[in-house]
């Protein structure tokens, strides 16, 4: 029993909101509709559970073995039409009660996909093990994060570069799979400003759990400002000697895979905004020491990562690269 409660506890904490995911506290139309359906099905399940379990306890007690009954053979009953009709009709009714709002909800979501007003398009590509977030109309590319305006539908176009991933932001609704060779769309909106956490919800390899992302919902005017600011960002000028050396090293070792300006796309994660990132690759806290450890051997922190290790870089090289990275605004 103790072991069981240890297994169930994380799920309960997760659902009730003792995590940043807060499944039961939706902040978008789609998530609200999904929570509503979830509550209806839970209510029906609880009703069935209590009725069946009460009957089970009652009959177990009523027909328990007693000294008088020990040698009595029960009569052999064959069929009971009334009972059989009852236990067929009740589940059908319960399924119909569940089906009506489910079908209605599914159609209303499909409609909102087609007729959304002034939607924002964002292409999300899943990679082992990071997310590329690309704004095709604005020409901006981010890694593991997105900005969206509140109260405006956002059409996420979901693609995969390798295996199946799944895009899930519990408080805004979802989730939908990212399949290689196919584009899926998911239309969501945020009804309140805030930071909404997301996670890959399909086991995609050794570092699946590190495929986290966040979506920041801001007012429309703030969103326009953010777009302007991102468009102006360019690769940084080498301002200090250390970062000049770092820039040269970066160009020779890292630039084939990593872009450093949001206006460019790259095979590996776009490193613009690295200075402000809380973690490196969603794993290590973004400190000077950790940046150096990461560059030397990323796969010891993020198993199965595509980035190669660089065991030949000297301490001086690593210092220069780390300084350069710390200046990527
Ligand atoms: Cu991507 Cu799990």
Image (tube, grey):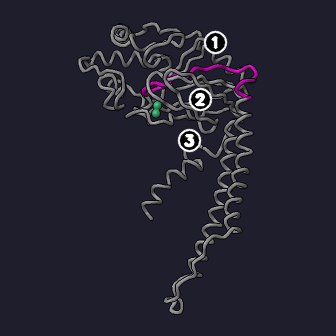
Mark 3 neighbour class, 10 Å CA radius: few under 14, some 14 to 19, many 20 or more: few
Q: Residue 105, how many percent across, how many down?
A: 72, 39
Determine whether the beta carbon of the residue marked 1 sits less than 8 angstroms from the nearest atom of ligand 1: no
Q: Earlier in the sequence, mark 3 or mark 2?
A: 3
Q: Is residue 200 above or below residue 221?
A: below
Q: Residue 129, how many percent across, how many down?
A: 43, 28
Q: Earlier in the sequence, mark 1 or mark 3?
A: 3
Q: Residue 287, how many percent across, how many down?
A: 40, 28
Q: Which residue is mark 2?
A: 215
Q: Which residue is mark 1?
A: 137
For the record, the magenta segment spans 111-131
In the image, 44 versus 255, the foreground residue is 44
In the image, 164 versus 90, the foreground residue is 90
- Horizontal side of 13 relative to 24 (left or right) equals left
Residue at x-position 53% and y-position 92%: 68
In the image, 240 versus 54, the foreground residue is 54
Mark 2 neighbour class, 10 Å CA radius: few under 14, some 14 to 19, many 20 or more: some
Q: Is residue 252 visible?
A: yes
- Tell whether position 302 is magenta: no
């Amino acid at each position: 029993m103790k072991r069981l409660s240890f297994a169930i506890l994380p799920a309960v904490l997760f659902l009730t909101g003792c995590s940043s995911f807060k499944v039961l506290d939706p902040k978008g139309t789609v998530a609200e509709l999904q929570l509503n359906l979830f509550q209806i099905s839970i209510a029906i399940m609880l009703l069935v559970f209590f009725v069946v379990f009460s009957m089970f306890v009652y009959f177990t007690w009523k027909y328990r073995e007693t000294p008088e009954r020990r040698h009595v053979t029960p009569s052999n009953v064959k069929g009971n039409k009334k009972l059989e009709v009852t236990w067929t009709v009740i589940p059908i009714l319960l399924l119909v009660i569940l089906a009506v709002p489910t079908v209605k909800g599914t159609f209303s979501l499909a409609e909102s996909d087609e007729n959304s007003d002034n939607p924002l398009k964002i292409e999300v590509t899943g990679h082992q093990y990071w997310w590329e977030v690309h704004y095709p109309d604005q020409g901006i590319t981010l890694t593991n994060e997105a900005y969206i305006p509140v109260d405006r539908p956002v059409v996420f176009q979901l693609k995969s570069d390798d295996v199946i991933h799944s895009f899930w932001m519990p408080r805004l609704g979802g989730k939908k799979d990212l399949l290689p060779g196919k584009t899926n769309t998911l239309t969501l909106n945020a009804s309140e400003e805030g930071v909404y956490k997301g996670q890959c919800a399909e086991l995609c390899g050794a570092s699946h759990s590190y495929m986290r992302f966040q979506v920041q919902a801001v007012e429309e005017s703030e969103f326009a400002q953010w777009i302007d600011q991102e468009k102006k960002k360019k690769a940084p000028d080498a301002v200090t000697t250390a970062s000049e050396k770092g820039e040269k090293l970066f160009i020779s070792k890292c630039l084939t895979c990593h872009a450093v300006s949001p206006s460019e796309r790259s095979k590996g994660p776009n490193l613009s905004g690295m200075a402000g990132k809380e973690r490196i690759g969603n794993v290590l806290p973004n400190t000077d020491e950790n940046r150096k450890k990461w560059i030397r051997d990323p796969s010891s922190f993020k198993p199965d990562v595509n980035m190669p290790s660089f065991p030949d870089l000297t301490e001086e090289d690593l210092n220069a690269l780390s300084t350069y990275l710390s200046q990527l605004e």
